[in-house]
Image (tube, rainbow, N blue to C red):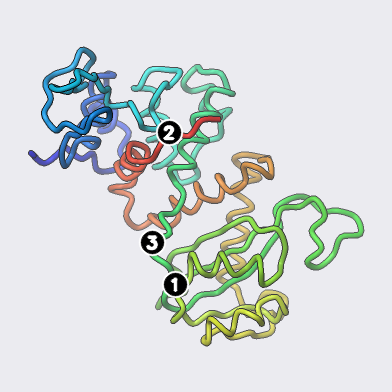
């Protein structure tokens, strides 16, 4: 199998030249989808010939004609594939992404249509959960939502509770992961820790009692006084930037869709030093993940 033509970079002019027709996009998807080998989805046969549609493949045994978009997040897209690629490029490479209102205006699509497709993109942007943080990690929880009268401390009311872990590296910060949780208890914290933080990591949290039971499985977990955030400046800056992004770009997101926005933010954040491949990575994830229906 010949090496595929991988798009690299964030330059919009270069992108427009590489993807100027639907055919360009179908070719790119086919090279990703059948990068290693072809196998018929119906019968498992590995021999094919050219299909009816652009870059589709027809099984020599059962004659099933498979499009490059079949079984991907581009399947049954409501608008041209070229627009889908350009939306994915904008969301992945722009520092702050784009709201569905901005997408609707720029690409002359219904906002609901943009929202549905962006939701698919956000699912693809979710972490693979294969690379937990193993170094120094600061962990904290925060709320997303406005002030509520009579609600203080970790009493969240209708606000959305989120836990975040930030990797601390020499001279700065590394990766970060955030997840919506039901409450600030050890039972809510534990699945998050197991997914995103290695058992050998040096974990530093505030003195909230919900972290105490986790010391059994995470012997390097340390609790220190927050000092009104002074002990955790890096993670508090990260939280403020995340909240500012949500308010400034999206204004509002429902509790049910908040995790998608957290995944979108951290997909770009964790690749801020390697933006060359971010679009290609997103497209590969959208091709290789099962389609998600609303």
Q: Position of residue 118 (x, y in %)?
A: 50, 33
- Residue 53 point in image, percent of width and height: 23, 14
| Image side of residue 120 versus residue 255, left or right | left
x, y percent for residue 268: 43, 50
| Above-or-below relation of 215 to 147 | below
Dot 3 corresponds to which residue?
Answer: 130
Q: Quadrant of the N terminus?
A: top left
Q: Nearer the viewer, residue 51 or 11?
A: 51
User: The residue tagged with tag 3: helix, strand or loop?
Assistant: loop
Residue closest to the eye, 142 or 123: 123
Against 52, residue 276 (above or below) is below
Determine the secondary structure under disc 2: loop
Circle 1 sits in a helix, a strand or a loop, which is it?
strand
- Determine crowd level at label 3: few under 14, some 14-19, many 20+ residues with C-alpha closer than 10 A: few
| Residue furthest left in the image | 2
**Residue tagged by mark 2?**
291
Write down the residue under mark 1: 172
**Mark-to-mark CA distance, 3 and 1:** 23 Å
The residue depicted at 71 percent of the width and 53 percent of the height is: 160
**Mark 2 closeness class: few <14, some 14–19, many ≥20 residues within 10 Å:** some
Q: Which residue in the rendered view is the most extreme toward the right?
A: 150
Q: CA distance from mark 2 to mark 3?
A: 21 Å
- The span from disc 2 to disc 1 (Cα, nearest Å) is 37 Å
Q: Position of residue 161 (x, y in %)?
A: 70, 58
């Amino acid at each position: 199998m010949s090496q595929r033509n991988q798009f690299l970079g964030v330059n919009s002019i270069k992108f427009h030249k590489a993807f100027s027709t639907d055919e360009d996009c179908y070719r790119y998807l086919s090279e990703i989808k059948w990068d290693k080998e072809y196998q018929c989805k119906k019968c498992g046969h590995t021999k094919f010939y050219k299909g009816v549609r652009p870059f589709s493949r027809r099984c020599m045994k059962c004659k099933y004609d498979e499009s490059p978009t079949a079984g991907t997040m581009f399947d049954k897209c409501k608008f041209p594939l070229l627009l889908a690629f350009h939306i994915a490029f904008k969301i992945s490479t722009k520092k702050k992404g784009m709201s569905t209102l901005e997408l609707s205006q720029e690409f002359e699509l219904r906002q609901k249509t943009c929202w549905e497709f962006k939701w698919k993109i956000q699912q693809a942007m979710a972490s693979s959960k294969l690379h937990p943080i193993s170094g120094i990690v600061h962990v904290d929880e925060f709320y997303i939502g406005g002030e509520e009268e009579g609600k203080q401390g970790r009493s969240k009311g209708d606000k959305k509770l989120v836990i975040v872990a930030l990797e601390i590296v020499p001279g700065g910060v590394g990766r970060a992961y955030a997840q919506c949780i039901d409450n600030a208890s050890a039972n809510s914290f534990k699945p998050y820790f197991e997914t995103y933080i290695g058992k050998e990591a040096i974990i530093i949290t505030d003195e909230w009692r919900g972290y105490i039971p986790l010391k059994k499985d995470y012997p390097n977990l340390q609790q220190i006084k927050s000092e009104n955030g002074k002990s955790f400046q890096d993670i508090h800056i990260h939280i403020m930037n995340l909240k500012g992004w949500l308010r400034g770009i999206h204004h509002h997101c429902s509790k049910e869709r908040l995790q998608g926005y957290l995944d979108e933010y951290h997909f770009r954040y964790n690749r801020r030093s390697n933006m060359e491949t971010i679009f290609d990575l997103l497209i590969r994830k959208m091709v290789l993940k099962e389609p998600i229906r609303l």
